[in-house]
Image (tube, helix red, strand yellow):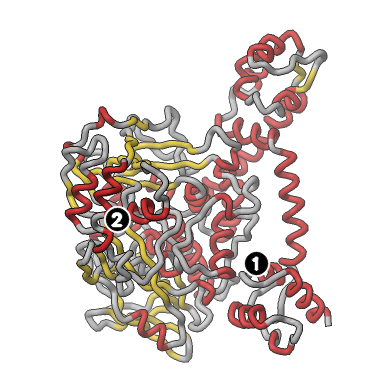
Amino acid sequence: MFPEYDIIVVGAGHAGCEAAAAAANLGSKVLLITMNMQTIAQMSCNPAMGGIAKGQIVREIDAMGGYSGIVTDLSMIQFRMLNKSKGPAMWSPRAQNDRMLFAAKWREMLENTPNIDFYQDMVKGLLVKDNRVNGVVTGLGHEIKSKTVVLTNGTFLNGIIHIGEKNFGGGRVAEKAATGITEQLVSLGFESDRLKTGTPPRIDGRSLDYSKMEEQPGDTEIVGFSFANTVKPLKQRSCWITYTNQKVHDLLKTGFDRSPMFAGRIDGIGPRYCPSIEDKINRFAERDRHQLFVEPEGWDTVEIYVNGFSTSLPEEVQYEAIRSVVGFENAKMFRPGYAIEYDYFPPTQLTYALETKLVDNLFFAGQINGTTGYEEAACQGLMAGINAHQKTRNLAPVVLKRNEAYIGVLIDDLINKGTDEPYRMFTSRAEFRTLLRQDNADLRLTELSYRLGLASQESMDNVIEKRSHVEQIKKILKEFVVEPADINGYLQQINSSPISEKQKAEKILLRPDIELHDLQNQLPTLGALLHNFTKDQVEQASIQVKYDVYIEKEKELVKRMSLLEDLQIPDLFDYKRIQALGNEAREKLIRIKPRTLGQASRISGINPSDVQILMVYMGR
């Protein structure tokens, strides 16, 4: 009934979709297995993509030839570039999406991708022989052979849903949990644990009073996520902001004795940076209110997502509390919020390719690795799909470094530090964030992807043109002479020091209170010289000029740190014989088996003296 596949992808969430698309576009024959064909690329939680650091990840996925950026652009109902008041390293795109359109576009793109087959069934086990996976076993009893398997099970592995004192099996509301895989992997020697996440109640938007809330419109200019020329919406839907209050908090507290979290019925640890509303008012008791974002679920639905009100309290408590929020006095609930507890496998059990160390040709991506968020899952799926393809062709794995991409930071963190709580990406996790901006993801990654055979010729041509035009703009700025009489009036208007002699435009642009579009407006001749360049190219040149000193400092730091990255540790290096290492360091080095001294230095619990000791012994 089934042919043998190069790659079987288990699960069709954000990680599974990107894994299947990447592998298929590279030429592998892929089978995507999901328990429900109607929930491919489901936005299980909030209907949004991007945000702080997450937006950079989506741009990187797009630059690498993934689909998330395109799908986001085609299904967005609102776009905002966050942190525009800060430096460009902090700018982060975020889109509000039409939940149903997002999933529909994903399925459409997958169905139009050659080399992908689909099958609806539950995978209950793996075919493993001699520590090598060679297929899966489904709930209907089918044994399907493949060269590699990518597990992207999300929250479905032994998932349990909690609402107050009620709990029942499920990977998502109204969808059953997946069983069998965890038990088999544990029997093979894998370590597993439990994590928790949650979601807020969904509300009937017709029952809300928006006049009592603060409107949050989208940006006038929609930049979008894809570097391709995707179609952007001609109009946008507003989101709204409101707040909890003391009455809301008091009502929520009446359900604490029945809270699965406080009563100890949930063992898994929840996301520190996206806590439930009950966790917020418990941990931050001094605050008399918390911000809530009222987010539409799409163009043609009245369903509302209440961002910031994630809860697993009893339904009646949720209902009474939500109706005490300003603007929600007459709110009607579509369904209550809930918490979900699920199995994950600490990611220190993986290589940089996201392949497991215990079983060859088996790859993990997404929440199975302890991460949270669509974007974090999608980028892992992309890399797992690429590397599963590479493995089937006996090609070297593709590994992004920390100075090359947020994706590289995420995977490096997971492999070396592991996580005992849902891992979420932040700009603060990246030590080279001036290099890893959302605006230059294409310049950083498209050439690599093109060499692999993933990014298109058109994408590569666009990058070549962008690089060339940016250098032309920088040359114009370096050579264009600005007369004092032409600029001093404007400088006085913005309380900036006037110039007493001619200056190059490049030098004036270095002032923190001046942007390139200001110079273009004030200096018509300069504006004419830059007229034929795109806004994206002009902005890229401006950023490179203004932040050149900081960029060069980070590049120098990358060079210094790369010295450790270039020092390879032999595969059979015997850490047991190094008596100078502490027990913790020795145990972690044996378990993780770092490839380089740079990787060893980033393992939690390894200190600089341990690295020095390793250098001495490797020298011997």
What is the CA distance from the residue labelled 2 to the residue labelled 1? Answer: 35 Å
Quarter that holds the C terminus: bottom right
Picture residue at 46% right of the left edge, 77% below the top: 362
In this rendered view, identify the residue nearer to me: 146 or 496: 496
Left or right: 567 as drawn, with respect to 177: right
The residue drawn where x is 33% and y is 78% is 3
- Which residue is denoted by mark 1 in the rendering? 602
Depth order, front residue of 208/102: 208
Q: Farthest residue in the bottom direction?
A: 130
Q: Position of residue 616 (x, y in %)?
A: 82, 78
Neighbour tally class for label 2: few under 14, some 14-19, many 20 plus, Cα within 10 Å: many
Nearer to the camera, 44 or 259: 259
Q: Quadrant of residue 85?
A: top right
Lateral position of residue 174 relative to residue 112, left or right: left
Q: Is residue 44 above or below residue 118?
A: above
SS under mark 1: loop
Q: In the figure, is residue 611 to the left or right of 590?
A: right
Category of crowding for the residue at label 1, using alpha-carbon neighbours closer than 10 angstroms: few (below 14), some (14–19), many (at least 20): some
Q: Residue 106, percent across and down?
A: 34, 53
Residue 171 occupies quadrant: bottom left
Q: Identify the residue at image location x=34%, y=36%.
A: 241
| Residue 225 placement (x, y as % from top left) | 46, 43
SS at circle 2? loop
Q: Which mark is residue 311?
A: 2
Q: Is residue 481 visible?
A: yes
The N terminus, quarter of image: bottom left
| Proximity of marks 2 and 1: CB atoms separated by less than 8 Å | no
Where 134 sits versus 528, above or below?
below
**What amino acid is labelled 1 in the image?**
Arg
Looking at numbered disc 2 in the image, what kind of residue is underneath it? Answer: Thr
Q: Nearer the viewer, mark 2 or mark 1?
A: 2
